[in-house]
Amino acid sequence: SLFEMDPRLDGKDVYTNPIYTTDWPDPTIWEGDNRFYSYSTTSLKNIKSIIASDDMITWYSTGIIPFDSETVDILRSMGSALWAPDVVYINGVYLMYITLHNSSLGQSKIVVMESSDPCGPFYYVDTTFL
């Protein structure tokens, strides 16, 4: 388990869900700068901020929207909801993959965004149709 793999949690109590009580569906968690970050499915009308934790037990809002304004405009032009994000760190770059859903067209797309900082902002890179 994660608690056995991470020595920072050694000897601490095991915690159960929800560890973050705000609506936080389909979350992803990534690590950067000795901190854990998380993002979740969200509406593009009311974009959530990234949450963070130093121990994966106590989570708090960073108050940081993960996308720059140009990327938000691009995302809103293609869809209405951001589903099941995932973030990976490759060659010094954080890549966020999302499923972007357009309910009026019944279409979904995979969108890739990148950032040099684990907390963003993430900038639009490319789109693939499903």
Image (cartoon, rainbow, N blue to C red):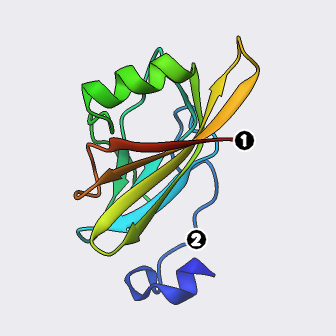
Residue beneath the point at 58% across and 63% down? 15
Q: Residues within 10 Å of mark 2 (few under 14, many from 20)?
A: few
* Res 14 label: 2
- Asked if residue 36 can be seen in this view, the reply is no
Q: Amino acid at mark 2?
A: Val
Of 55 and 111, nearer the camera is 111
Q: Which mark is drawn over residue 31?
A: none
Q: Is residue 130 visible?
A: yes
- Residue denoted by label 1: 130
Which of 130/44 is in front?
130
Q: What amino acid is labelled 1 in the image?
A: Leu
Answer above or below: position of 103 versus 95: above
In the rendered view, does 3 fall on the left or right side of 47? right
117, above or below 35, in the image: above
Q: Nearer the viewer, mark 2 or mark 1?
A: 1
Q: Is residue 26 above or below residue 33?
A: above
Name the quadrant of the C terminus. Answer: top right
Secondary structure under the numbered disc 1 in the rendered image: loop
- Quadrant showing the N terminus: bottom right
Query: First in sequence: mark 2 or mark 1?
Result: 2
Is residue 105 placed above or below 3 in the rendered structure?
Answer: above
Q: Nearer the viewer, residue 31 or 55?
A: 31
Residue 31 placement (x, y as % from top left)? 37, 67
